[in-house]
Amino acid sequence: MAMTGFVKYAKRGAALLTALTLLLAVSTSSPAYTQASLDNRPYDAQLLRLSEILGAIHYLRELCGAEEGQLWREQMKEILRSEGSTAIRRAKLVQSFNKGYRGYRRTYRACNESAKTAIDHFMEESADLTSVLVKQN
């Protein structure tokens, strides 16, 4: 991948990480939920999709030589810390992350244009989802 490709991904990644940090700050300062609502929240569909996307990004960016180590897995751990208030919630979030990771691991064995396009799509979708989640909380 050309150096300009890495710069483009790095800028998108930095913007996404900033948005994720804001999301985590907002979600941890939300009012307390009742016990019945601890496992299910109104924004769970978006949060589970974001978790799945983070798993896909984690796999695909490493495959395409981003050399970011565990950056995306660490972002998922932060979501688990702030949103994984019960074992059931944590399990759902982890399952979604693993679904994204494993699904793309089965599909892509080498970095190619299709994988790069998927990364672009996921970076945009995750930024949009994060923005929606911040507004909802």
Image (cartoon, rainbow, N blue to C red):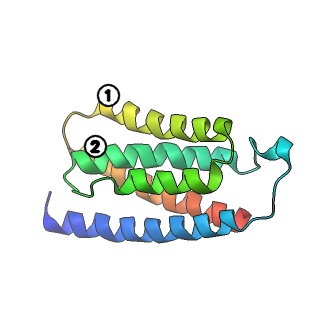
> In what quadrant of the picture does the N terminus appear?
bottom left
Q: Earlier in the sequence, mark 2 or mark 1?
A: 1
Looking at the rendered structure, the kind of residue marked 1 is Arg
Q: Residue at coordinates 19% horizontally, 52% vertically from top-left?
A: 65
Q: Residue at coordinates 30% horizontally, 45% vertically from top-left?
A: 60
Q: Percent from the top left, x then y, of residue 109? A: 21, 33
Mark 2 highlights which residue? 114
Between residues 37 and 55, which one lies in front from this camera angle? 37
Looking at the rendered structure, the kind of residue marked 2 is Ser
- The part of the image, by quadrant, that contains residue 3 is bottom left
Q: Tell me the element at label 2.
A: helix
Q: Tell me the element at label 1.
A: helix
> In what quadrant of the picture does the C terminus appear?
bottom right
Q: Residue at coordinates 60% horizontally, 36% vertically from top-left?
A: 92
Q: Is residue 134 visible?
A: yes
- Which mark identifies residue 106? 1
Q: Is residue 121 visible?
A: no
Q: Percent from the top left, x then y, of residue 4? A: 19, 69
